[in-house]
Image (tube, coloured by chain):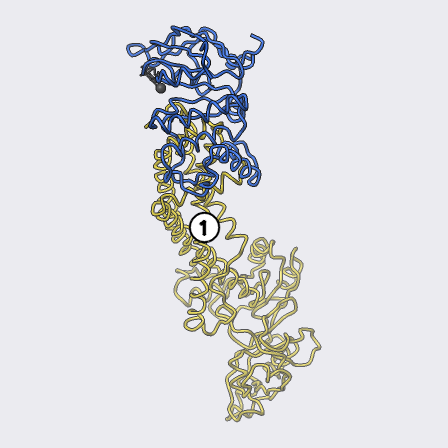
Amino acid sequence: MKNSLLQTKDLKKVYGKRDTVFEALKNVNIDIESGESVAIIGKSGSGKSTLMHLLALLDQPSKGDIYLNGQNTSKLKNRKLNRLRNKEFGFVFQSFFMNANDTVLNNVILPLKIAGIGRRERKRRAMEALKVVELDDKFKNKAKDLSGGQKQRVCIARAIVNNPKVIFADEPTGNLDSATGEKIENLLFDLNRDKGITLIIVTHDEELAAKCKRQIRIADGAVVADEKTKKGAR
Amino acid sequence: MKVTDVFRDANANLWRSKLRSILTILAIFVGSFTIILNSAINAGVNDFIDKQIENMGGEGYLEMMPTETYDQLAALMGNGGVQEYTEDKDVSNASPYIKDEQVERARALEGMKSFHALPSATADFATSDKTDKRYRINLNAIVPGINIDMSAGVAPDTSDDAPYEIALTEDMAKALGYENPADSVGQTIKIAVPSNLKCYTVTRRSECQVIVEAKIAGTQAPGILAMGGSRANIALWNRINEINFEGMPEGANHTFQAVADVEPDKIDEIKTKLEEIGLSAMSVDDEVGMIRVFFDAILIVFNIFGGIALVAASIGIINTLFMAVQERTREIGLDKALGMSNGKVFLSFSAEAIMLGFWGSVFGIAASIIAGNAANILAHETFLKDFPTFQLTVFEPLTMISIALIIMFIAFLAGTLPARRASKKNPIDALRYE
Ligand SMILES: Nc1ncnc2c1ncn2[C@@H]1O[C@H](COP(=O)(O)OP(=O)(O)O)[C@@H](O)[C@H]1O
Ligand SMILES: [Mg+2]
């Protein structure tokens, strides 16, 4: 408990109304510690993304609470939530989510621009992040001209540019071939190991899940297993 | 996010759908161009009219004649209706004149700065050393407190005991042999003044004329509204009157008109009081007011056109931005996921609307200055040839900036609808949208 970063209490999420109500999450209780690498694994439609969105404070639960560093987030104002996401979290999505017509540099800069950081400082930090993903030579290129793997690396650069405590990755390798996917995975795990960034990876890929130190298995909106990788893990 | 970044990005975003933005800016441009050009013409015309009023004596200048004269003139011109005859208001016989008692009461009115009852004075012709020809001369008096706009020289000395001086019209100066108005300054002309009583008894008019010499103080700037005629100073005017009435009984030398300079803000009140005294007064504004009303009416019509163009442009802005919000759903979702507040999302779309208004106004200002100056040059080559001081369009920076700000505000208002929709977007829905 003392090192608890994200904790949920009886988390419920219901979509729709009356005839169409659908319980996407049912009483989820999990506890993620700082520095962990956690896989949220399950079949398509099981509620993984829904859970991740709640943990990332992108959405509000229908019932239950989320505690960040022991603080109940349902009490926080929008302003504070925006600041938390901007400063403490990094996001990587399956379908990249970037501004395709903008340059690589501008895509990486985005969180810093939102934070209101000055032009020179944010450029310097973005170039640093691009160096980590080995794309600093492509900073002037348009994002749409990159390959899939390169795009995802730009997204990782964007996710780490603000020195986050947690990176949320939703199917980060879902749109990539296995070789490129592995490179992305390695990047993420290096960040976890070297910088102590907590990694929360949503995936239906057992192999990727096995590389995490912990797997939270979801089926039909409920946690069905929560286990630590024993031996041989990274 | 910094506001400067918001506006810089908004401006960059406009060029993502170039054609759409340009068409919207074009619509705003039409409105801003019309309104800015109108305001410039309005300023030019008003400037000119104000100058003309100044030429004619200024805002506080009043010309008076007995009220009976008005009625008489009205009856003569047939638009006074059928008037009942009463002995004490006999308008059919002798010319009515301004009585001493009326002068005294008028002088005592509050706000009256100077009052001059002018006896009548007429001259036959003027000539000079420079010409053998003689020209009919139309005279007006210049009294203290009245400024006239001189194109050369200075205004005549208006004190009672000044030397005889005159301010000629430019045309008269030219006719009298002075090619340049400046050449005439300080020169002396001869004015032939009839001694009216004597004229009944002689066979040749020249036998009853007295020649008076007067110094040309300067020439008057031409104006469309200024009353015609050269202006004699009081001393010259009185001398001419004296000659006109030589040998006539004292009582025959009546005053038929008067001029006054009054406090401009009391002018209406004074006019009413003068009416009670029996004097009908006309201010310069009464005479030129019609021209102002006429121009105002035209400009109102054009401003309505400009306004309609702006309404259409606002609809264009709403439409353009709704399309942009739709296209950028994912982008908005990403911005919000990365911590952008609803307020900043609202601001970023409002900023785009404001930038549309900004560019529309900037191009409107630039084009109206170019068009206005071209029109000015053209006008001075044609119908304004004789009025070099009449600037058809006057561009006042403050007016243009205010108009631009108002247009940007209208654009902002139009942008609030789409901006609100953008700010209400849910980041999750936006991220799921594929
Ligand atoms: N906005 C929504 N409205 C209604 N149902 C939704 C909505 N979002 C997700 N769901 C449903 O909730 C369930 C879980 O979705 P999701 O968390 O995306 O699953 P996963 O990421 O595990 O594939 C799915 O059945 C999905 O159809
Ligand atoms: Mg999913």
Q: Residue furthest front?
A: A232
Subunit that carries the residue with mark 1? B
Q: Residue visible at 71% across and 77% down?
A: B161
Q: Residue furthest right?
A: B161
Q: How many marks?
A: 1
Mark 1 neighbour density, 10 Å: few (under 14) some (14–19) many (20 or more): many
In which quadrant of this rendering is ligand 1 seen? top left
Residue where numbered disc 1 is placed: B361
Image side of residue B45 versus residue B430, left or right: right
Colour of chain B as rendered = yellow
Query: Along the line of sight, which residue is nearer the eye, A119 or B430?
Result: A119
Q: Picture coordinates of residue B208 (x, y %)? A: 56, 89
Q: Residue visible at 44% across and 9% down?
A: A11
Colour of chain A as rendered = blue
Q: Picture coordinates of residue A71 (x, y %)? A: 56, 13
Amino acid type of the residue that numbered disc 1 sits on in the rendered structure: Ser
Query: Along the line of sight, which residue is nearer the eye, B285 or B155?
Result: B155
